[in-house]
Amino acid sequence: MVDCCNDKACEIEALRNRQSSTLKIVLGINAAMFIIELTAGLIGGSVSLVADSLDMLGDTLVYGFSIYVVARGVRMKANAALLKGGIMAAFGVFVLGQAVYKIVFPQVPVFEAIGAIGLLALAANSICFILLWRHRADDINMSSVWLCSRNDIIANVSVLFAAVGVWLTRSGWPDILVGLALAVLFLRSALLVLREASSELRAIKG
């Protein structure tokens, strides 16, 4: 009987199983946090929370696609990465629209809601980040997933800064500025993922 440690096919299958299990866990966490953050953001009138909730939804979709392509070939993974990049870009544009709306129709959000939900989201995404860390260099699929997770941590910390800013200024501007910053982050990350996926596809065709 061949030892699994010396069997490359067995090693690859074991890696795929670990990737799939990790992705299912982080998918569940993000799906739950999307509902929580969106509800709190709409009730509390927070652009940053709505932006972060949409990021959670985008991640949920991304993880779902990633689970699907774990056992697929390089071309499928690159195409999935293109789709992920498109989703990230779409959410960036949506958040920009939300920020513009709040500028035109100003509203002071509930900073307590922003802070409390922001802390909860940071804890949830920290767990996802730790789970995905060891898979960050596996392939383009897991690399793009890890990039999404890293951005989530940055977004969560930014949301907490927004809560403090709203509390200190009694103004909605800190929340709007954080929302705009998150939109730029989404668009920048989308560009990076799209560029890498396009490069991978060109290499395959070449």
Image: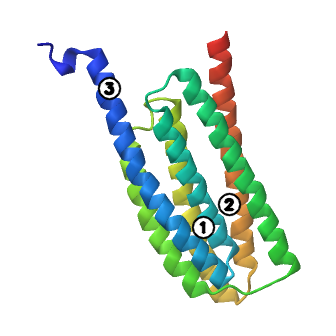
The residue tagged with tag 1: helix, strand or loop?
helix
- Label 1 packing within 10 angstroms: few (<14), some (14-19), many (20+): many
Between residues 101 and 28, which one lies in front from this camera angle?
28
Q: Distance between the residues labelled 1 and 3?
A: 38 Å
The residue tagged with tag 2: helix, strand or loop?
helix
Q: Which of marks 1 and 2 is nearer the N terminus?
A: 1
Q: Do the residues labelled 1 and 2 touch (CB within 8 Å)?
A: yes
Q: Residue 168: horizontal and vertical position, in percent?
A: 64, 88
Q: Residue 101: horizontal and vertical position, in percent?
A: 83, 73
Q: Name the residue under label 2.
A: 182
- Label 2 packing within 10 angstroms: few (<14), some (14-19), many (20+): many
Left or right of 153 on screen, residue 164: right
- Label 3 packing within 10 angstroms: few (<14), some (14-19), many (20+): few
Q: Residue 13 carries which label?
A: 3
Q: Earlier in the sequence, mark 1 or mark 3?
A: 3
The residue tagged with tag 3: helix, strand or loop?
helix
- Residue furthest out toward the left: 1
Residue at point 40%, 38% (across, down): 135
- Quarter holding residue 34: bottom right
Q: Residue 32: horizontal and vertical position, in percent?
A: 47, 65
Residue at point 70%, 87% (across, down): 169
From the viewer's perspective, is residue 2 above or below residue 179? above
Q: Residue 199: horizontal and vertical position, in percent?
A: 67, 23
Q: Residue 158 carries which label?
A: 1
Q: Distance between the residues labelled 2 and 3?
A: 37 Å
Between residues 7 and 155, which one lies in front from this camera angle?
7
- Say which quadrant the N terminus sits in: top left
